[in-house]
Amino acid sequence: MKELLAIIITVLFGLASVSAQRRMVVVDADLKVPVRDVQVYTPEGLDTLTAWDGTFVVPDNFSRLNFHHPHFEQRYILPSELRGDTIWLLPVSNVLGEVIIWGRRRFDERMQNILKPSPEQALLNQLPQAVPSGPNVLALAGWLYKKTIGKAVEKRSRRKKHQKAMREKEEEYQRKWDLLKP
């Protein structure tokens, strides 16, 4: 009798632990197919991967379920948000598996053809380049002009422009005044 009672208690505890778990499935939101190898973990220490059919078992008491897969957006679910047994994951929109580009770099070839000197230019390049010896007199004259009288000349030209504009305004006002006289 005691053995039968021990077996019944063991079975009841086993059923109680089974009833405290839920089987859920993770599904791709675009293709509507189960997703395998999704990492499901909780802050309480549960860490599991979904099976080939996207299923996993979760206990009834958890604070949050976290879902991670490289091809899907990360997601977490609180217990109050669970409706049914299906979790939908959104695919990452910018995932590329591999990109292979075949071909020649035609741009580089075109640039080499453009930059290739013409036959005339090649002949000119072979000639020795004569560099005048001595100081650059024109540059020296420009520098002296700038340092000595350049600012005064510039100031005088600005003053003349301003005076011309003032004279034109005065003449315009004088014409308007003359039109107003009877």
Image: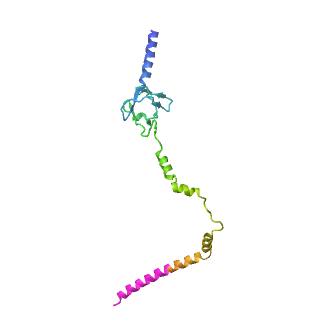
Query: Where does residue 68 sit, x and y in percent of width and height?
Result: 46, 34
Q: Which is nearer the eye, 68 or 78? A: 68
**The residue positioned farthest toward the left in the image shown:** 182
Instruction: Tell me what residue is drawn at x 51 percent, y 52 percent.
Output: 115
Image quarter where the C terminus lies is bottom left
Instruction: Tell me what residue is drawn at x 50 percent, y 49 percent.
Output: 112
154, above or below 46, in the image: below
Q: Which is nearer the eye, 22 or 2? A: 22
Image quarter where the N terminus lies is top left
**The residue positioned farthest toward the bottom in the image shown:** 182
Q: How many marks?
A: 0
117, above or below 32, in the image: below
Give the colour scheme of this rendering. Answer: rainbow
Q: Is residue 3 magenta?
A: no
Quarter of the image for residue 133 reads bottom right
116, above or below 173, in the image: above
Q: Which is nearer the eye, 92 or 103? A: 103
Quarter of the image for residue 125 reads bottom right
Query: Where does residue 83 sit, x and y in percent of width and height?
Result: 37, 33
Query: Where does residue 94 sit, x and y in percent of width and height?
Result: 43, 40
4, above or below 120, in the image: above
Q: Is residue 176 magenta?
A: yes
Q: Which residues are magenta?
A: 161-182
Query: Where does residue 18 sit, x and y in percent of width and height?
Result: 43, 22
**The residue positioned farthest toward the right in the image shown:** 134
Prevalent SS, magenta region: helix
Determine if residue 74 is in view.
no
Instruction: Tell me what residue is drawn at x 49 percent, y 52 percent.
Output: 114
Determine if residue 7 is in view.
yes
Q: Which is nearer the eye, 120 or 170? A: 120
Instruction: Tell me what residue is drawn at x 46 percent, y 28 percent.
Output: 49
